[in-house]
Each structure stands twice: as structure tokens, then as C-alpha cells.
């Protein structure tokens, strides 16, 4: 009860009252504190279950007895979190004053958690000394995320990546931005740099690669047109990938674009007008396919001058196949499936040494008399499941009609 609450008013006016807003804030904070205490107690209980009883023998030896009969208990908070995770994430997005407290209640699987859900604080505690970002990757399923080619470099460097499989996670990262001073960075975005590398050496390498591949990047941008924002030499290691389509630092990821396209009133036109992701085509300057593609560029005295000659058809097809491969590696659909299929047919034709893809003429089988198909007794299990060895043919030969019980048949 409160003496300050107005009486005899409608419900809408009462909801806008200042006292009710204060009550709402205090109830929200109290609920968050209870959930936080619940998570801490649940974590401590799991740690305590791992303790084994020890006894000292008469000889002075310590005998540790494991409780083999005790089954591992499931974390009570994780059971609760599985049902209300979406509500907490929605609170992180909408409740800015309590965002810092709610973020600590989140749990995610990572590339090093062995399938367990861990808090962000544990992720930060396991970061590399030179690491200054929290790396995340979104997708529809865990299997899709784990097989993403973007993880190759992070696995080689021993970096942990958070797996985000729910659509609301994409919105959460955009609203949260950082945790404990560490920014959230999508591993599918461009310009990811690692502090364990020599910055001066990397800068000189980038400058040399850009000059070397300028004819190729310029021609590829003209060829691809509006399907990508720009074509550039990758500023980070792409591992074994020849090329990949990354999202711009200020654009939407491939997973976010897929989520937006699934919305009811979203259209392809809206995506093309800026609501979609800004695709950046990154090439791997060390990959043999990219080097071979550069060799297919027409010679010119100056790389800045336009050349009248164009690469041959095989080089153009190879460039488009590289484009489709990079789109799929980045999680985007192929822009022109029909043209992609035609190029794949040409590759198969060359692989099998076929001179032409002209269809063979139709066969003209001879006319046969219509005869009933012979029954397949083997497929029928022997006369519909009957075994001929069970019949006494000699006895049936001496049997007359009077000896047969026709009623039973």
C-alpha cells in the first residue's frame, strides 16, 4: 500500500504514475539479484560435487574414495536458463540500465567449452594476453557454425569463438557492443587483425600485395558489379580458402541478412537499398588459384591504364566460380544459380573429356508379345510364404476327392 498512489482513476493513468515506475525498477533489480544468486549457488554446488572423500590409513597413507554411485548432477541454473534464455536476452536488448547485470547471466557454447554453456566471464578469463575482443559467430545450427571456414584461422591460433545459434543473438550483439571492456567482433567481418603479429611487417605485406594484385582486383570488381561492395586483398589470414565474402564492419552479417529476409514484410528490394549486408570480396594472395587467376590477366604497361583486351572465357568462368565459392564460404547464397549450374556442367564436361553435351537419341526397343510376368517365387518367400517341402506329394497323389475336407479349404 502507498498513500501517494492516486485512487479512483482509470488503469492507463495509474500505470503512468511515478510511484509505480519506482516500484517496477526495484522489483526488476530484486529479481535480477535473485537470479544472479541462484546462478552462483548452482555453480558452487557443481564444484562441491567434485570433491572426493579422503581417509588416512593406519600406515599414514591417504586413501581417496570416489563416489562411483553418484551420478553427475545437472546444473540447476542451466536447466532454468534453457527455458528463459530468450527472456534474459530480450532484457539485455531493451533494459539499458540493467544491461550490465543481465549480460552476466548469459551462457553460450564456445569452440573450447566441449558442448557446455559457460558465462562470458569464463570466456574473458581464458582469453589470450594480446586478445582485446570477444569473437562470436552466428548461424542456424551448431553443426553449421562448427563447419564454417571462418573458424580455421582462429583454431590455428588457439582463439576461442562463441557460438550463437538464436536469431535474437544477432540483435543482442548489436545492442551490447562490449563486455568487461572487450568488444564483440563477428569473425565473419572484414579487417580482423591479431595483436600477436608484427604490425609493421603486416602493413608492408598489405601494401605489396595490393600493388601486385591491383589489375586482378580492379577487373574482378568490374566483372562482379553490384553483387559485392568491393574487391580487395584480404587483410587477415584466410587459411586454405582462396577467397571469401566477408561482411563490412558497419554492415549486417550473412546470418543477420538471412534473419531479416525471413521476416514477413521484408523484400529483396529493401535488402538492395541498404538494409542488407555490405559484401566485401576478400582474395587470398597466397593461394595457387588466385595466383593462377592473376597470370590470366592481360599484360599492360601501366596497371592504372584501361586495357582494351579482356581475359579469355576460361578465365572469366574461373573468376565467377571463385565468386560463387566465396559467397558460399561466407554464408551467402549464390547470386545466379542458373549460370552457376552451367559453369559446373562445363567443368564436368572437361573432367570427363566430353566433346559435346548433346543428348543421345532415344532408344527404340523391339515389339514384344504381351505375356504375363512369371511370378517370382523367391521374392514371394516360396509360394506366398509356403514351403513346398512341407507337402507329402506321394500321399496327395493317392488321395481322392472323398478324402479331402473341402469345408476346411
Image: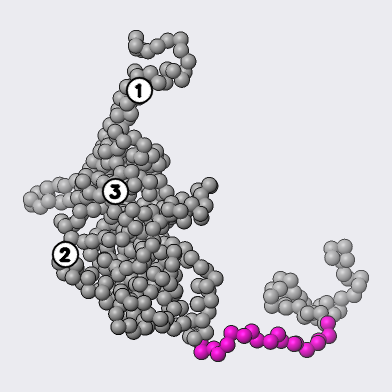
SS at mark 1?
helix
Label 2–label 3 contact, CB within 8 A: no
SS at mark 3?
loop
Mark 2 or mark 3: which comes first in sequence?
3
- Cα separation, mark 1 vs mark 2, equals 52 Å
Relative horizontal placement of residue 125, taking residue 404 as reference (left or right): left
Residue 199 image label: 2
- Cα separation, mark 1 vs mark 3, equals 34 Å
Residue depicted at 26% across the width and 74% down the height: 211
Residue depicted at 77% across the width and 80% down the height: 374
Range of residues picked out in magenta: 352-370
Q: Nearer the viewer, residue 11 or 336?
A: 336
Mark 1 or mark 3: which comes first in sequence?
1
Q: Judge depth for marks 1 and 3 and give the one in front.
A: 1
Residue at numbered disc 3:
118
Residue depicted at 46% across the width and 12% down the height: 9
Queried whether the magenta region covers residue 368, the answer comes back as: yes
SS at mark 2?
helix
Q: Position of residue 83 (x, y in %)?
A: 41, 41
Few, some or many residues within 10 Å of mark 3 (<14, 14–19, 20+): some
Q: Is residue 406 above or below residue 102?
A: below
In which quadrant is the C terminus drawn? bottom right
Few, some or many residues within 10 Å of mark 1 (<14, 14–19, 20+): few
In which quadrant is the N terminus drawn? top left
Mark 1 or mark 2: which comes first in sequence?
1
Q: Nearer the viewer, residue 183 or 126?
A: 183
Residue depicted at 43% across the width and 67% down the height: 225
- Cα separation, mark 2 vs mark 3, equals 33 Å
Residue at numbered disc 1:
21
User: In this orientation, does residue 328 appear?
Assistant: no
Q: Position of residue 77 (x, y in %)?
A: 33, 40
Dominant SS in magenta: loop
Amino acid at each position: 500500500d502507498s498513500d501517494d498512489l492516486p485512487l479512483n482513476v482509470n488503469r492507463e493513468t495509474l500505470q503512468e504514475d511515478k510511484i509505480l515506475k519506482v516500484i517496477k525498477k526495484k522489483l526488476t533489480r530484486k529479481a535480477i539479484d535473485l537470479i544472479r544468486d541462484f546462478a552462483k549457488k548452482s555453480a558452487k554446488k557443481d564444484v562441491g560435487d567434485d570433491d572426493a572423500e579422503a581417509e588416512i590409513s593406519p600406515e599414514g597413507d591417504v586413501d581417496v574414495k570416489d563416489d562411483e554411485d553418484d551420478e553427475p548432477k545437472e546444473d540447476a541454473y542451466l536447466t532454468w536458463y534453457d527455458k528463459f534464455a530468450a527472456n534474459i536476452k530480450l532484457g539485455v536488448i531493451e533494459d539499458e540500465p540493467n544491461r550490465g547485470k543481465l549480460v552476466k547471466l548469459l551462457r553460450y557454447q564456445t569452440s573450447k567449452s566441449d558442448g557446455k554453456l559457460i558465462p562470458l566471464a569464463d570466456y574473458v578469463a581464458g582469453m589470450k594476453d594480446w586478445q582485446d575482443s570477444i569473437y562470436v559467430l552466428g548461424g542456424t545450427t551448431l553443426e553449421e557454425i562448427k563447419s564454417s571456414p571462418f573458424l580455421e584461422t582462429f583454431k590455428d591460433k588457439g582463439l576461442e569463438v562463441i557460438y550463437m545459434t538464436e536469431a535474437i543473438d544477432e540483435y543482442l550483439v548489436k545492442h551490447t557492443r562490449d563486455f568487461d571492456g572487450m568488444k564483440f567482433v563477428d569473425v565473419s567481418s572484414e579487417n580482423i587483425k591479431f595483436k600477436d603479429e608484427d604490425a609493421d611487417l603486416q602493413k608492408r605485406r598489405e601494401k605489396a600485395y595490393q600493388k601486385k594484385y591491383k589489375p586482378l582486383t580492379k577487373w574482378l570488381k568490374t566483372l562482379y558489379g553490384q553483387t559485392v561492395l568491393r574487391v580487395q586483398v584480404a587483410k587477415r589470414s584466410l587459411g586454405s580458402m582462396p577467397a571469401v565474402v566477408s561482411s563490412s564492419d558497419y554492415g549486417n552479417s550473412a546470418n543477420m541478412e538471412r534473419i531479416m529476409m525471413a521476416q514477413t514484410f521484408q523484400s529483396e528490394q529493401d535488402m538492395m537499398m541498404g538494409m542488407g549486408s555490405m559484401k566485401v570480396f576478400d582474395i587470398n594472395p597466397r593461394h595457387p588459384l588466385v595466383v593462377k587467376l592473376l597470370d590470366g590477366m592481360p599484360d599492360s604497361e601501366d596497371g592504372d591504364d584501361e586495357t582494351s583486351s579482356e581475359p579469355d572465357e576460361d578465365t572469366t568462368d574461373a573468376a565467377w566460380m571463385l565468386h560463387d565459392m566465396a559467397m558460399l564460404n561466407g554464408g551467402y547464397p549464390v547470386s545466379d544459380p542458373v549460370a552457376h549450374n552451367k559453369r559446373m556442367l562445363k567443368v564436368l564436361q572437361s573432367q570427363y573429356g566430353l566433346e559435346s553435351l548433346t543428348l543421345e537419341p532415344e532408344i527404340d526397343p523391339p515389339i514384344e508379345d504381351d505375356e504375363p510376368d512369371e511370378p517370382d517365387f523367391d521374392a514371394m518367400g516360396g509360394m506366398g510364404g509356403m514351403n513346398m517341402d512341407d507337402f507329402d506329394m506321394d500321399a496327395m497323389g493317392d488321395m481322392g476327392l472323398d478324402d479331402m475336407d473341402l469345408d476346411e479349404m
